[in-house]
Image (cartoon, rainbow, N blue to C red):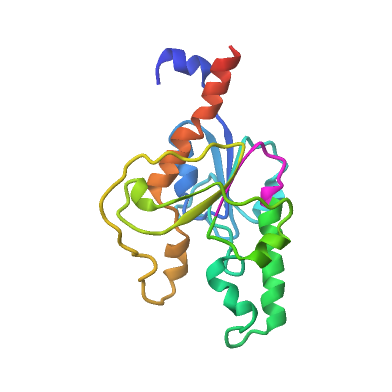
Amino acid sequence: MSAIQLDFFRPMRVLVGCEFSGTVRNAFLDRGHDAWSCDLLPSEDRSNRHITGDARDLLNDGWDLLMVAHPPCTRLCNSGVRWLSSPPPGKTKEQMWAELDEGADLFSDFWNAPIDRICIENPVMHRHAKERIRNYQDFAQSVQPWQFGHGEVKRTCFWLKGLPPLVPTDVVEGREARVHRMPPGPQRWAERSRFFKGIADAMAEQWGSMAFEEARAAA
């Protein structure tokens, strides 16, 4: 960063909710921002920039950007709508619908947070989820890992507020559905929720520079 850029640079206060890996948090930290992750689980990398708890308790703490990396989405996503009418073994319909309400409330709290810039990552939702989310809007864009340097297929949708769509940075060959083909196991859920570093870097580069551009425009 040049001396002229440093004159205008203002670090963003960034909260990355529902992230224990630190991938998105570290991408913003590496670019000079005041970034924190928060999850019910402790930080995988034992960072002192992680808060163990419910991210909703932090939403009023003056953040410039809220990035929700992977909120619990099992009951909201289109692929799981069948469980609402035919519950899996050990579950009842009442439990399924109650879990749907909980998931919709969580998404709603993040989406309606008093923060100017918000990104929530989630799969495509079914209509019952959309009906339950306060001030629902359709997702702004969907991206693939292979657009950001990872030779994999895993469609990710972004709900954006106060942020422009991400621009692909490194389109590569390779269309492997690695995560979807993983065998069942104790770590499968963690790998499914792990964010792609190339996408995290693009967020930090493109959205993190907004504070710099705004400061320069105001000068």
Query: Can residue 103 be seen by looking at this rendering?
Result: no
Query: Can residue 214 be seen by looking at this rendering?
Result: yes
- Of 63 and 217, the residue lying toward us: 217
Image quadrant in which you'd find residue 125? bottom right
> What residue do we see at 62% from left, 35% from top?
64
Where residue 168 sits in the image (x, y, percent)? 39, 41
Q: Is residue 176 above or below residue 55?
A: below
- Of 142 and 186, the residue lying toward us: 142
Where residue 29 sits in the image (x, y, percent)? 47, 37
Where residue 35 sits in the image (x, y, percent)? 54, 39
> What residue do we see at 67% from left, 67% from top?
128
Left or right of residue 127: residue 196 = left
Inspect the magenta stretch and tell me whether residue 6 lies in it. no
Q: Is residue 31 above or below residue 106?
A: above
Image quarter (top left, top right, bottom left or bottom right) of the C terminus? top right
Q: Is residue 30 above or below residue 2?
A: below
Image quarter (top left, top right, bottom left or bottom right) of the N terminus? top left
Left or right of residue 206: residue 66 = right
Inspect the magenta stretch and tell me whether residue 116 lies in it. yes
> What residue do we see at 71% from left, 57% from top?
133
**Magenta segment, which residues?**
110-121
- Of 91 and 81, the residue lying toward us: 81
